[in-house]
Image: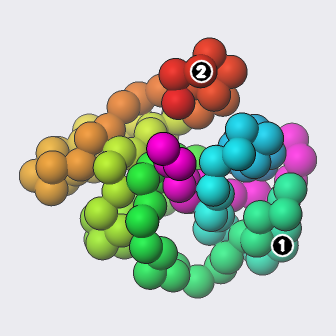
Amino acid sequence: MNKKTLVLGASLKSNRYSNYAIQRLVINKIETLAFGLRAGEVSGVQIDTDLLPYNGVHTVTLYLNPNRQKEYYNYIISLKPKRVIFNPGTENPELYEILKENNIAFEAACTLVLLSTNQY
């Protein structure tokens, strides 16, 4: 099953974990979408700067600190993902509760580790 993934908080900077996550998702042949503050491309994936109504998103992987996440709560819920991954530094109990209320699974984990250990 293809776990179509949205990287929320994508960066064009090659030293950012979100950038590396996009690269690793592509290498693992996972359909990848990206949203960030600056448009551009990473490993053939276009970083969108508009919140597009993507269809069929399985996973949202977060690279935004909890304060920055607030403005995206409704957007994340609207995508109806199967799960949300809270990468290190993005853990957010407030959003955990909102996800629970909407029957969306979540985990505090590292996308890069999940990919490298075949647990994604």
Q: Residue furthest left?
A: 101
SS for dot 1: strand
Q: In the image, residue 100 lies at what x, y percent?
A: 15, 45
Q: In the image, residue 24 lies at what x, y percent?
A: 75, 38
Q: Amino acid at mark 1?
A: Gly
Q: Residue at x 86, y 41 (%)?
A: 15
Residue range of the region highlighted in magenta in the rendering: 1-17
Using the rendered view, name the quadrant where residue 105 is placed: top left
Q: Does the magenta segment cover residue 53?
A: no
The circle on residue 40 is: 1
**Front position in the image: 20 or 115:** 115
Please state if 86 lies on the left or on the right of 45 as rendered: left
Magenta span dominant secondary structure? loop
Q: Is there CB contact under 8 Å for labels 1 and 2?
A: no
Q: Amino acid at mark 2?
A: Asn
Asked if one can make out residue 17 in the rendered structure from this viewpoint, the answer is no
Please state if 60 lies on the left or on the right of 26 as rendered: left
SS for dot 2: loop
The residue singled out by tag 2 in the image is 118
Using the rendered view, name the quadrant where residue 47 is placed: bottom right
